[in-house]
Amino acid sequence: TMPIVDSDAHVIETSETWSYLSEAERKFEPMIVTRKSGPGEQAYTGKEIREYWVIDGLLLPKDQNIGSEATPEAREMRDIPGRLAHMDALDIDIQVLYPTLFLRPCTTNPEIEYALCRSYNRWLADIWKQAPDRLRWVAMPPLLSMHKLIAELEFARDNGAVGVMLRGLEHDRMLSDPYFYPLYDAAGEMGLAICPHSATNSFLMYNLYHDDAAFNKFKLPTIGAVHSLLWHGVPERFPKIRWGIVEVSAQWIPYLLNDLGLRLRRRGIDMPGDMLERNNMFVACQVTDDLDYVLRYAGENTLIIGTDYGHADTATEIDALRKIRDDGRIAPHVIDRILDDNACALYGLQ
């Protein structure tokens, strides 16, 4: 039986996440505060946001994107056996874990960023040790402390990480910026995937669209990052890198490749028909995508799928893996590739 891989599941951070801070880093520990008065913000589910993280003097919603399909203990990784039992019920063999807090910008202070990333990575490492065959994860890189990056990636690789998470914009830089080349070089040598996830690490972008849908501040920057990476030939420069584009659906692939092809032809370059596969790019689709149409452009060797486990936004589909297998729209061998082969290829799973 082929393993079924949930390529995009989430953890919900708690105070335990920061218990790995060193004594010198304790001053950076995020606080949790509760709103007692004043007008409330709405979470994605329509409920009022009650709790906030306080990081570097900023208030960040803590319960903005919390799904109800899983228990709090499973979402927060306080009940690993319970989470594994829920995975069994959903016919999921392996989950690849992504963060929740870091989907938005938290700080521009290098010391704070390093401390939080380091503590988060060690929290995930201890989670992995409780179920090493079933719970894998992507690491948070301290991008403002590049001199400490290699050691952090080596720790992550040696403790169950299969990738490195990036956001569509990182500290107001495009992912094609040469600033990130040392990260790409190191990740390629270590066999870690680079995983741009629907998110932004730009306060300018985040605040500009603060009252708008997450589509504008999270998804569009990530899709734009793919275009920029391909336009500047970054995947060709780092052929060992496997790229995972996560939680932005796959419906945009035909548009992006059409636009890219037009621009390349103006330079006298013919774009290959297998542009994504040739550049080791994998894209997480959704059950609501027109997959027959998307597959004509993406090819059957590039799509993966995730449940967005733990969340409650437009990408969340707790039964996504079961539905894509059972709805009959896609040929069985293509479904096998989406649920297993492609995901294992992206994340280097055996």
Image (cartoon, rainbow, N blue to C red):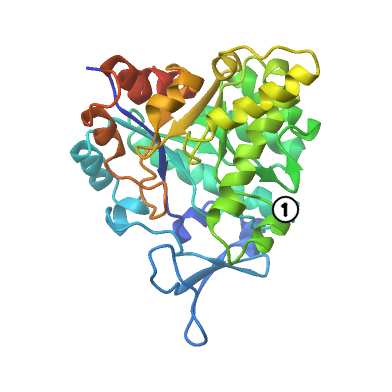
Query: What residue is at 53 percent from the left and 42 percent from the top?
Result: 121
* Image location of residue 291, percent across then percent down: 39, 29
Locate the C terminus by quadrant: top left
Question: What amino acid type is highlighted by mark number 1?
Answer: Glu
> Which residue is more in the foreground, 56 or 43?
43
Residue 19, visible in the rendered structure = no
> Which residue is more in the foreground, 158 or 287?
287
Q: Is residue 115 above or below residue 153?
A: below
Query: What residue is at 49 percent from the left and 52 percent from the top?
Result: 100
Query: What residue is at 68 percent from the left and 44 percent from the top?
Result: 169
User: Is label 1 in a helix, a strand or a loop?
Assistant: helix
* Image location of residue 239, percent across then percent down: 65, 14
Q: Is residue 223 left or right of residue 77?
A: right
The quarter of the picture where residue 208 lies is bottom right
Crowding at dot 1, Cα within 10 Å, few <14 / some 14-19 / many 20+, comes out as some
Q: Which residue carries the number 1 mark?
A: 111
* Image location of residue 217, percent across then percent down: 61, 53
Locate the N terminus by quadrant: top left
Q: Is residue 28 left or right of residue 2?
A: right
The quarter of the picture where residue 224 lies is top right
